Amino acid sequence: MRSKCGRTGRRRKNKAEHGSNASGESRSHQYEYIQLCKWLKERGFQNNYLRPVEFTDTGRGLATTQSLQPGELIISLPEKCLITTDTVLHSYLGKYIKRWSPPVSPLLALCTFLVTERHAGHKSCWKPYLTLLPNSYSCPAYWEDDIVSFLPQPVKQKAMEQKTELHDFYMSSLPFFKSLQPLFGENIDNILTYEALRWAWCTVNTRTVYMKHEQKDCFSSDKDIYALAPYLDLLNHSPGVQVEAAFNLKNRSYEVRTNVSCRKYEQVFICYGPHDNQRLLLEYGFVALSNPHQSVYVTKEVLLRQVSCKDKQMVKKFSLLHENSFLENLTFGLDGPSWRLLTVAKLLCLGSEEFMCWKKVLLGNVISVSNEHSGLELVRKTCLHLLEETSLILKEISSFTSKNILVEKHLALVEALRLDELKILQTSADILENMHRASR
């Protein structure tokens, strides 16, 4: 029978079924997604217009089949679909958690549940969701140390701390893992391995939504604020998007509403928060393009290299800055150096006869023309130093070779972060040069 919808109608139908455009390919027809949607529907989830799509720039995400207006509900996921500590306590792990001392953390409870359910395979009632979770992540916890070494110093330090934290988390959890041996017919050491816990830890840290739970005696005093939200966690981050997300106590569902419009067939985004790319990379394993929150951080060590070693008051100056919490968040942005960075530089450049005016500097007062000029020059030297350092690192990254696909992927993330910082530093250098000329 001949279709009555006409050529335009057929095009619209094909567009709806197979993807919005060349930038994305629908995954609605894939078995794993069909099973997930069926499983969610059985638990009360009604998906009216979101569908999974593989996008060329952001990977898998969700597109809408109809236009969205500000204030409109994007998704409402029933409580039965969420994995929380309540889910864990009502499972076979519950009695082991309740009798363990000292109490396990909510994070450990969720991680243990994810690993054991994944190990259960087709026997797990959460299999449709677990099947679609990544097998590994791009967070620095998965990186080789030589890749971490290419990171800017502030985020490099945090990345190493993340790896240490994860290792300590695993080691401290071993006694609890041993207590679960009666649940399994094979050696628990082969199930709750470091690699398995790392996967679960990254799953929780990258994919959970914020959902506050009542504190329970069987858990440690750590905040119980996690909820894994199947399907909802396919929504990707965009720094320019505004949404409202919270658990609705009336209908017992986790809801997300958009505060911006979204055209039909476009990808639907949410915002994880006003995070710079360093934090996004560290916590979520990606770098956002055109991130308005992106900055280049200046450390105390970098400043020390630029100041005069002959200044006998330098130790006291840094001590005063530390006492007044002025050594954190010193940054360059696309609009140039931050006020805090300029202020710190002016204090560091105070002459011996001006030193008693340090409080006025921190309050934003002008001490002298020479101090303003010296502070500006210190910031300019710092910017040029970081610009040179970043350029050298990018050359090293270009010459780094590896046949490991994961290593290449992680290296590409570092390169993206460094290129973003190079752009900021070049812009800041131009701004500072203009400021320097104007101050002559």
Image (spheres, grey):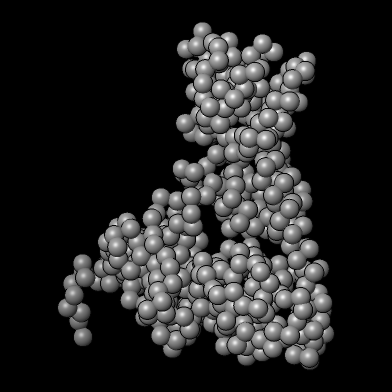
Q: Position of residue 414 (x, y in %)?
A: 64, 46
Q: Position of residue 230 (x, y in %)?
A: 50, 75
- The answer to whether any part of residue 335 appears in the image is yes
Quick check: 284 left or right of 58?
right
Please give the name of the residue rendered at 59% of the width and 44% of the height, measured from the top-left corner: 417
Determine whether 114 is above or below 198 in the image. Answer: below
Please give the name of the residue rendered at 77% of the width and 72% of the height, measured from the top-left corner: 173
Please give the name of the residue rendered at 52% of the width and 49% of the height, measured from the top-left corner: 275
Q: Nearer the viewer, residue 257 or 193?
A: 257
Q: Position of residue 408 (x, y in %)?
A: 67, 53
Dividing the picture into quarters, in which one does residue 254 lie? bottom left
Determine whether 161 is above or below 25 in the image. Answer: above
Please give the name of the residue rendered at 40% of the width and 71% of the height, measured from the top-left corner: 255
Q: Nearer the viewer, residue 24 or 422?
A: 422
Give the mark count. 0
Q: Position of residue 41 (x, y in %)?
A: 41, 85
Dividing the picture into quarters, in which one does residue 250 lie? bottom left
